Image (cartoon, rainbow, N blue to C red):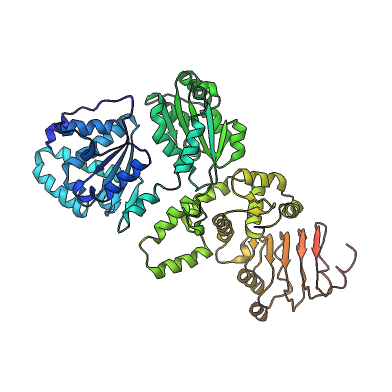
Amino acid sequence: MSIQGVSSYVPYPLPHWKYDVFLSFRGEDTRKNFTDHLYSALDEKGIIVFRDDKELERGESISPGLFKAIEESKISIVVFSRSYAFSTWCLDELVHILECKNTNNQQMVYPIFYDVEPAVVRKQTETFQEAFAQYEEVFSENIEKVQKWRDALREVANISGWELKDMNESEFILEHLVGIDSHLKNLRLLMDKECNVVCMIGICVMGGIGKTTLAGVVYDLTSHNFEASSCLANVREISEEGGLTSLQNQLLSQLLKLPNNGIWNVYDGINIIGRRLRHKKVLLIIDDVVDIKQLECLAGKREWFGPGSRIVITSRDKHLLMMHGVDEIYNLRELHDDKALQLFCGLPLALKVLGSFLYGKTTKEWESALKRLKRESENEILDILKISFDGLRETEKKIFLDIACFYQGENRDYVTKILDYCDFDPVIGIRVLIDKSLIEISTDSRFWMHDLLKEICQQIVKRQSPEDPGKRSRLWKEADIHHMLTRNTGTKTVEVIKLENFTEEAEMHFSTSSNSFLKMINLRMLLIRNLQLPEGLEYLSNELRLLERHGYPLRSLPSNFQPDKIVELNMRYSRIEQMWCGIK
């Protein structure tokens, strides 16, 4: 294909998409294997796909036909392979794909790296380096063209995509298509209701289950049905970094195709949005909302938008969506057991992150990693899902950590009573946690949460002091409690200690001083059974609300203990003769 022929073709915008997906690939590498599988899988899902060997009619000019197909496609999937760069045809396609993406900001581009690493494509090393060494000789008089190819490869390789290396192709394709079909179908049914009115739909679920992915797929597959569309991703982050006006400017830029809307304050932005969009049928995706103010400045009222508009809002907070008065709330559930390993509790984020960690490891390394996962969650999962935790108030965080560390599976009324002792306002706090999809209540009124979230909460506590348990707020493991009490390292940070029984081995090597609890002045719950105190006990925190000390070996509690806040005391099987000496 001549360079002149390509450069003479001028792209033009089209009002409607003819294809959902344009497939760009090196035929001799992937046509008879991966690309065939991918094409078939997409076609089975009802996705209209263009690929050159199927669609172009005999006699049609190849270059304009291909370029027109790119322009008529909503999404381009670029399959990079080892010899991709040896095809000037593929490189010209890639440049044109980026022109369509960057000129009108509508076409979505997703790379797949087939048996080649993203870094190789991005840096043009190995086979890509060989190809460009040839081009710099052959096209020495048109070196700008070669540089365009380099820039295009670098730009697309920097887009988040998928890497397929030494992996079963069918499994790879299924992995990235399963799980979302039923959600997509249900959500589109909600969107198709009452076609001529403005409809607001909320997608609610805890972080990591896939609400952002689902909203993105809905946007990709339905935006061509609207006069204008906008996908505001990561609203929480953008709002924190650039403020609400940056979101308003981005929204208007995408919907009106204007480079700068000159919004300097939120109220001007509200007026402009309502005035400029009220006659337009728009699709607006607002992703990861954490504050009602974000919705009030972006989609405060239905009359801001034209008839038939759809506003899709994703949030971890169900109460926030209800406050805004959305028409429907779609509660996104985790993947079913046949689609996600029980170990990962159906969380796509966990599957992705932990899958990346385990990919390419030996069987022994897998076994070792699985043991490790029982002890701690991978940092990337913790950091991402911790966003939900960071958005809580302090008392809500305390309630959440108490439930995760101590009360999984316990009766709601009983736990509410315990937390009420601690002045945490648990009725409201528990409702907030439920609305944010962080905990659930089972049919028999017991607390339930994902194992991964439980692990994350326990890791949050462990991170308070990785090496010194005495500087953590909550202790529930025998080894940590043993470490703290035998070394007398407890501090004012400790709030709760709960352990059913020490093992016989631990008791044999357990020796604690009489002032082991002296520095734990904020201890509010102490539940330990069969703990021996050979030197006696001189101090207990006056903040204690709940003291459960089965088998207490002494005749009384410390004389300086002030039980003003105690609401539950359980001293069964103890040798106690009187609660304390003197009048309290």
Which residue is at a point 34% across and 32% down the rendered structure image?
105
- Residue 244 appears in the rendering: no
Taking 459 as reference, is 129 left or right? Answer: left
Against 41, is 374 above or below? below
Taking 111 as reference, is 60 left or right? Answer: left
Which residue is at a point 25% across and 52% down the rendered structure image?
120
Q: Nearer the viewer, residue 565 or 479?
A: 479
Taking 538 as reference, is 302 left or right? Answer: left
Against 562, is 429 above or below? above
Question: Residue 73 lies in what quarter of the image?
Answer: top left
Against 338, is 368 above or below? below
For this orientation, the residue located farthest to the bottom is 508
Against 343, is 104 above or below? above
Which residue is at a point 81% across and 70% down the rendered structure image?
572
Question: Residue 507 lies in what quarter of the image?
Answer: bottom right
The x and y percentages for residue 1 are 13, 37
- Residue 490 appears in the rendering: yes
